[in-house]
Amino acid sequence: MGGSCSKKEMEQLFKIIDLNKNDYLDRLEITKYLKQNYPTCPINIVDLFIMLADKDRNDQIDRLEFMEFYKQVLTRVQLDSDLTTIVYLATTVSENSQKVTAQKMVQILRCFGIKKTVAELKKDAFDKEEFVDIMGEFFQ
């Protein structure tokens, strides 16, 4: 899944994942696709994928949202490579920033069932190394 990907290839991937053929991806379809193709990928990445890709917050990723997210993020890394790199890239790309805000960090940790507050993180933003260190604590 890494490397550059043509629009046609992205369209084909969308169609493969869209089992219901309803022109949007839901949690179940994404989960099934990841389990079949990336069995070592933590399933909580589905929550993260939806949080970052679903711009209109309706729990459905339409074709445009998928294309945008895939083009910006998933073509840069292998999905089964380091999860923290994927999360960092996805977050910073979606935020147009080099750092991950504490608020976004709290949301990301919640996706993985880890309850932390902004105050507990003791910083306003995290660069890549800090981000990887924090995520590494939870994914050893």
Image (cartoon, grey):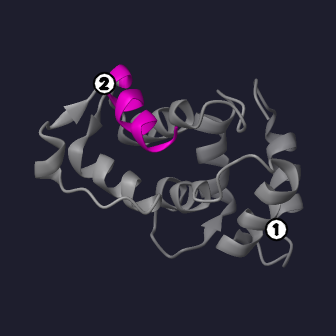
- Tell me which amino acid carries mark 2: Asp
Q: Residue at x 70, y 68 (%)?
A: 25
Mark toward the viewer: 2 or 1: 2
Q: State the residue at coordinates (72%, 31%).
A: 78
Near-viewer residue (22 or 103): 103
In the picture as drawn, the residue positioned furthest to the top comes out as: 129
* Three-letter code, disc 1: Asp
> Left of 63 or right of it: where is 116?
left
Q: Position of residue 132 (x, y in %)?
A: 42, 29
| Image location (x, y in percent) of residue 90 | 50, 39
Q: Which residues are magenta?
A: 128-140
Location of mark 1 (residue): 18
Q: In the picture, residue 111 is in which quadrant?
A: bottom left
Residue 26 is at least partly visible in this image: no
- Identify the image quadrant of residue 30: bottom right
Earlier in the chain: of badge 2 and badge 1, it is: 1
SS of the residue under disc 2: loop
Total numbered labels: 2
Residue 127: mark in rendering: 2
At x 52%, y 55%, the residue is 48
Q: How far across and down, in percent of the image, does residue 7 sit?
A: 79, 40
111 or 9: nearer the viewer: 111
Question: What residue is at 59 percent from the left and 54 percent from the top?
Answer: 45
Q: Position of residue 86 (x, y in %)?
A: 56, 35
Q: Locate the N terminus and report the quarter of the image it occupies.
A: top right
Q: Is residue 20 left or right of residue 115?
A: right
C-alpha gap between disc 2 and disc 1: 35 Å
